[in-house]
Each structure stands twice: as C-alpha cells, then as structure tokens.
Amino acid sequence: MPARPCRGDHGRRVTDGRRGLQDRRRLGVAADGRREQVREGGVRMSTTARHAAGIRVSELVAPDLVVTAPSGTGEEAILRAPWDGAELARIPTTTPDDLERVLDRARTAAAGFRWTPAWRRSAILEGTSRLIEENAEQLARLIAAEGGKPLKDARVEARRGASTFRWAAEEAKRTAGDLVEMDADPGGEHRFGWTIREPRGVVAAISPFNFPLNLVAHKVAPALAGGNAVVLKPASNTPLTALRLAELLAEAGLPDGTLQVVVGPGRTIGAKLVTDERTDMVSFTGSPPVGRQIASDAGMKMVTLELGNNSATIVDEDANLDLAVQRVVAGGFANSGQICISVQRVVVHQAVYDAFMERLVPAVAALKVGDPLDETTDVASLINEGETERVKGWIEEAVDQGATLATGGVDADGRLRPTVLTDVTRDMKVCAREVFGPVLSILKARDLCEAIEISNDSEMGLQAGVFTNDLNKAMYAARRLEVGGVMINEVPTFRVDHMPYGGIKGSGIGREGVKYALREMTELKMVAFREMDWQTGGTPTDACLREPLGP
C-alpha cells in the first residue's frame, strides 16, 4: 500500500526570505547556493554540498522540509518508511574521526554550560517546549513516517515531548540541595552544612526508535536542566525527529556544541560513547543484552538503563470489564505493541474470563491496520521486516505448542494483524520474553494471589496494571507486584512525564521522569563550613555580649 501524500504545508520553508537566508548560512551554504566549508568543533572540514545544506526530507512527510545534518561526514544511509519502504531521506553517518571531534567539542561545551544560570537553562527549555508545540504537526508526521507510528499516536507523542521540556524548565530551577544539621552529632558544633548538585559533564544519550521524540526528550531535557552537555545517538531507523528537535533547541538559544547528534552503528559509535573517558554518564533505552553490555563496559561512570518488560495486567473478578477491555486494547496495540510497557500478558480471574474475552476479541478485531499517515489507522507496521518476521515466528511457535489464535495473525497480504492468544503457557516466548509487537497473551488465574504469582514470574519488572474495585486488593497487589510501577485500574502502558519511571530485576537501573532523571544526571556535593571567631581565630565565643542574657 503506497504512502499517502501530505496535504497542506506542514514544513519549514528554508529558501524564502530572510529566515531562509539565515538558515542556509547556518547550515553552511552560501546565499548563491555555492558550497562553503563549515567548522565542526573548531576544525575546518571539507563536506559535500549535500551534507552542508542539510537533509531534504521526502515530500511524503512535508513540502520543502530540510533538517540539519548530524555531526558526520561518512557514507549516507538511506532512511526508508517501515510501512512501504518509500525513501524518506539520506542521512550522512558519523565516522570514528567525526566522533573524536564531537567528543572534544562536547567537553568544551560542558565546561561552559555548567555555569549557565538556572534561569537561563529554564528559559531555553521553556522556549523549546513552545517551539515543539508550534511545530507539533510537522514533528508528528516525521514520527509517523520514519517510525511507522499511527499519526494519531504520533500527535500524542508530540504533545508529550512539549510537556517533558516544560517539566524540565521547571526542574532546572529546583536543583538546590539540602541543609544538613551538622551539630546533630557530637563533633559537629559550630558548623553549617549543605549539599549542592553539580553537572556530571557530558551525557551520552542512546535512544530507541519507538518514541523518537519523547524518549529523546527524557534524556536530553533533564541533562540540559542539570547543566550538562549531551551527545545524542538516536536509533538509526528514526534520526530525523531527533535532528529536528536539535534545531528547535538551537532556535531556543542552546549554545553551540551543547547538544550534538551522531548517527551510526551501535557497535562502533555507540560503543565509543560508552567507553570513552570524555563521557561522564550513559543513558540508554533498548534491549536487555545491549544494556548488560553497556553496564559491563561503562566502568565507573554513571549508567541508567531502561531495558523493557513483558508487562502484565491483572483483571480481578470485581473489575469494571468494559474499562479493562478498553484500556487493554489501547495499551496492547498502541504503536503496534512497540512500547516498553505495552500490555503483553493479561491475567484474568477465572470467574470473569469468558465475559472478558467476549468483549476483548471483537474490540481487537475491529482495529484498523494501515498506513501510519492515514488519520484513521489504529495499527501500522513494525519497524522493519526482520522484526515482523520474528513476531510472526513467535506466534506460529506458540500455536504449534498448543496456544489458540483467538483473533489476528497474518492476513492475506502477509501483514501482521493485532493478535490475541489464549491457552498459552508461561514458558512460551510470547509470555516469557518481550514480544515488542501487537500480541496479547491471555492467562487464567484462580484468584488474585495466583494472578500476582503469574505476573511476578518474569525476569523483568518495569510496570504492571491491576483492575479491581476493592481498595484492599489494590493495596495488596501494589505491595506485592515485583515491578517499578503499579497502575491501579489502569494498564502498565500508562505514563505521564513527571512521574518516576524505571524498573527492577532485568528491566534496568535508575529512573527517568524529569525530576528523578535530573538527580541521576547531577553529582551531589557536600559543603561543610566551620564558624570561626573573627577576633581570636578559634572556637566562636560570646565576646560581643557585654551583659548576661535575661532580665
């Protein structure tokens, strides 16, 4: 099915008027179209005119849209739409020599940006939030085109990206530490103490494809709020949104070099960001095997890892079934199930199992599969053909092992449809591992205790959901589910951008959510101040008192 052409001008025209001339100069192109040489990190570099002029994005996304090229002079990678393979853009990649210059420039930028006052950092982040809102439709179309996310979901992501930067603008003004009562312990008399938070330096941010704006925002925004420089490596499948965001940050006043975007393979570019002594922290969202390798290679530097989940949702016997079904469908098939907290396992009390399934199956079957740029599409394609074939294989394997295909599977055109499996067992891949695709596995439980035990039977523990109208049961489940977040009468897919977000067990280390990420991205420093007698230089006395206190 061909991609639908864009109606209307959602792009930013860079060839008209004063603004176009300024943009062309900023991108390294002379007013008459001749190639100029551009400087990268203070080093004069020869680039092709194509690299200097930026990246022209397909008209399928927006007319006349050009985004700034990443920090790279390497071979071009062809970016294709996941839905139909249409070419979207050609992206210059970052070479090892390019990365050396990027890291040197990042160190220089970090040394200056750390002293930027809080009000200025806040203003930059607030300005970026406004610019995201002003360019929300353009960003949504970029997200939909390069990531395959349905346009209506992409619009939600654009709004959330603006919210994340707005929260970061607030938190940039709240980096003060705590007063420490030094004299609470013997030996602490005549001393004052307080803590301050300081930037770590250079944050290496490695983001995935499934939220090319908001998961980038959750790394970049708190890092900048804390006074750090950032080297961002977006997923190779979805670099355009990140590059456009970098432009908006620059337009909002972010100093040159404070955010640099690099594009290239993880085994070279990503590995160097993790191990190089010029980076002080690594923030990574991605697969568990890569996350474990990063934790091993990073040495003593700070690492935060968000590594996914096979999220469980419990539906108890007293649950509101209509609400549960509506939320399970939304949480299981948004972005074709390519969300770290997508509903994957649904554990239903046996007393309401049949009634739940009678509602669930037709609701899933009614979802529309189609072009992500179609306003009416509910579910599009997975990020690439390899992932599609993997998920198809897992479904086929589960059916061969005894699972029942209640709805979905593969249609006549070979497209993967939203799928519901019953009669599954816990050891099947569709239950035991993260599917990262449009598949729900439905399990039956005798009671809440067994439902919790089934949910906890996982190597991962990011978030879980519980549907019940009994407060005592809700509290019981919240305390006993082995996850980083429990959502009551909601699916684990629920997230707002100022809440703490992160997992336990194999789901990762550390927390996102702007306030909590900011703590990870700054160092705590203790300052202790000893009071001295200005006359004697010794322990303070009451030398200034001429008369005893009191009546």
Image (tube, helix red, strand yellow):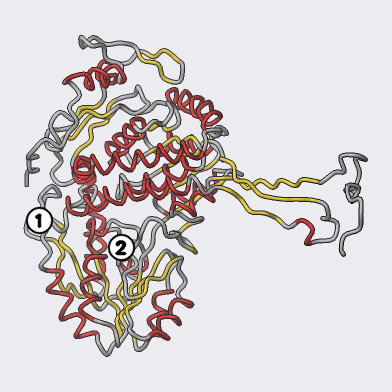
x, y percent for residue 48: 28, 16
Q: Residue at x 41, y 19 (%)?
A: 40
Residue 301 in the image: state x and y as whole percent: 58, 43
Circle 2 is placed at which residue position?
Answer: 342
Q: Type of residue at label 2?
A: Ser
Q: Residues within 10 Å of mark 1 (few under 14, many from 20)?
A: some
Residue 286 % position (x, y) = 39, 50
Q: Nearer the viewer, mark 1 or mark 2?
A: 1
Say which quarter of the image contains residue 311. bottom left
Residue toward you, 371 or 414: 371
Secondary structure beneath dot 2 equals loop
Q: Name which residue type carries label 1.
A: Thr
Q: CA distance from mark 1 to mark 2?
A: 21 Å
Q: Tell me the number on the disc at residue 339.
A: none
Dot label at residue 376: 1
Q: Residue at x 27, y 26 (%)?
A: 76
Quarter of the picture containing the C terminus is bottom right
Q: Residue furthest front?
A: 551
Q: Is residue 332 left or right of residue 488?
A: left
Q: Is residue 105 above or below residue 116?
A: above
* Label 2 crowd bin: few (<14), some (14–19), many (20+), radius 10 Å: many
- What percent of the width, then of the height, locates residue 303? 53, 48
Give the vertical position of 36 relative to 293 (above or below): above
Front residue of 351 and 527: 527
Q: Residue at x 47, y 46 (%)?
A: 283
Name the residue located 17 percent from the left edge and 64 percent from the top edge: 418
Kindly state the secondary structure of the residue where label 1 is placed: loop
